[in-house]
Amino acid sequence: MKKTIIFLVLVSLFWSCEEEFLDEKPEDFLSSANAYTNYADFTASVNNLYFLVRRQFYDRDENRPFDFIYGTDLVYDGEPGGSQRHGNMEQAYRPDGDIATTHWNLLYKTIAEANTVIGRAPASDMSEAEAKDIISQARFFRGFAYRVLVTLYGGVPLVTDEVTAPKIDFVRASKEEVLNQVVEDLIFASQNLPTITEATDGRVNNLVAYHYLTEAYLALGKNTEAITAASMVIDNPNTDLMRTRFGSRSTETPGDVFWDLYRKNNQNRTSGNKESLWVIQFELDVQGGGLQSGNRGGSYAFERHFAPLLRFRPFNSWPVGDYTGGRGIGWGITTEFYSNQIWGGDASNPDFTNDIRNANHNFVRVYNRDNSSALGILANDIGRDTIWSTETQPRRREFYAYPSKITTPYNHPDGLLRPGSVPFALTSSAGGTYTDQYMLRLAETYLLRAEAYLANSQPALAAADVNVVRSRANASLATASQMNIDYILDERARELGLEEKRRLTLMRTGQLYDRVIENNPFYVQQGMQEHFNLWPIPADEIEGNRGAELQQNPGYN
């Protein structure tokens, strides 16, 4: 009898606390139950959001970061034959291809991680100030990711809560609904992120949120709101265009303030650069820093893709880390439009000579060691044909004009220099660009507000903003009568070429197809079609979404 009573008591205790008894409480390993507790936990997750952005746009692999440049009006593939650099465009943009699938996955990975942080922060041990810091960053990155998604794919599924169980019934929200979510997240971020003077180098700040909020308002047709948001950035007393020489190599000649913007260690505000708004951080020989002194593994292979491949006399010591392009391989050849037409065509146009952005140290046409215009070979004189065909390319892969911002002349790490008598001779492991990278700087905000003024039927104010940028460059001033979207896109190419994510700009403005047809004969030959203004929804997403129809974009099978 005594045994029976003890048994019943034990059963009673078991059933009364069954749920608590079965709760797993890991104490000696990390799990979803204990990974989000304090500020350090959440900071680690937010740091991964920064990493995901750098991974997508700068250092994931050899090709995917440059999907935002290839297939536009600026460059074409110097070694055609495949789809990696957007040649054979129908193949490149297949719904089951790497391009559309990789970026979709990375963007939704960013959103998923942001949602986890946002959802779990209120129940954590963080203080109110710590929670505000964490949530404002997470909401910025969620808004940023949806901004890119809606630009690349149109309306996409909206997911704003952590998904904790399998879900196979996603449906596409409208473009307007997605943009409204972007606005909501970026308003929160703009009101709660640290100011630009409070934020450390590489951290997002409230002005970055205001800039991207401007884009979202423009896409929604809210031009007045767009102007107001951009003005928050431009009118901030802590931002300004750099107009005098500064930074690590400011005493060197030839050079100017535009050249200084891209020199090593000059991108962050700690260098005195008041123009930078958001800078992606790279560190040499630091774990996770993205740069290595002995090879280009994991680096931003900007130089490798877009600098020329020199293999003939007088450059038989190639590669050399000077104004011969470093260790480029000539994949991203500049179009006639980018290297000549936007500057006025040739030296008979004053802007071709006077605009400092087109000076030889900024847009290299004369290849030699000292960057002297009196010596060397003029790149423009080799193959100026403007029609690309399968038999003849307009320029040689080995020799074409290129912007020096894509390389680091005389600044490659010592571990990449070959021993011998040739100064700055590089090993075959070179090809990265050994600087921090601008995701956003103030000149772009001026050109974005000009776009908003133009959309708001205020061309004189649009011209005034464009002329702030052109004045710094010593270019002739634009007039109100010249203001149209093509002029602003041309100015963006002059100021931001290969630096901005050109595909996002052209897709956002609905100009990708028209600009490629007009300015890039190579991609016309490669099958450019109007429906490429949007990428396809990845086939895996459609096939795996068995509980609802996830509609494909028009034009894709």
Image (tube, grey):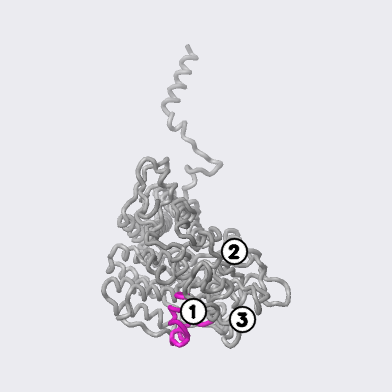
Q: For the residue marked with disc 2, what is the amino acid?
A: Leu
Q: Give percent across and percent down for residue 451.
A: 33, 72
Q: Which residues are magenta?
A: 336-360
Marks 1 and 3, Cα distance to the nearest angstrom? Answer: 21 Å
Mark drawn on residue 368:
3
Give the residue at the far front of this rendering: 391
Tell me the tag on residue 258: 1
Q: Which residue is mark 2?
A: 291
| Circle 3 SS class | loop
Q: Residues within 10 Å of mark 1 (few under 14, many from 20)?
A: many
Most foreground residue, 431 or 239: 431
Q: Answer yes or no: is residue 57 visible.
A: no
Location of residue 248 in the rendering, given as x and y in whole percent from the top left corner: 56, 77
Query: Is 368 part of what is drawn in magenta?
Result: no
User: Which circle's residue, 2 or 1, is located before the other in the chain?
Assistant: 1
Which mark sits nearer the N-terminus, 2 or 3? 2
Q: Secondary structure at mark 2?
A: strand
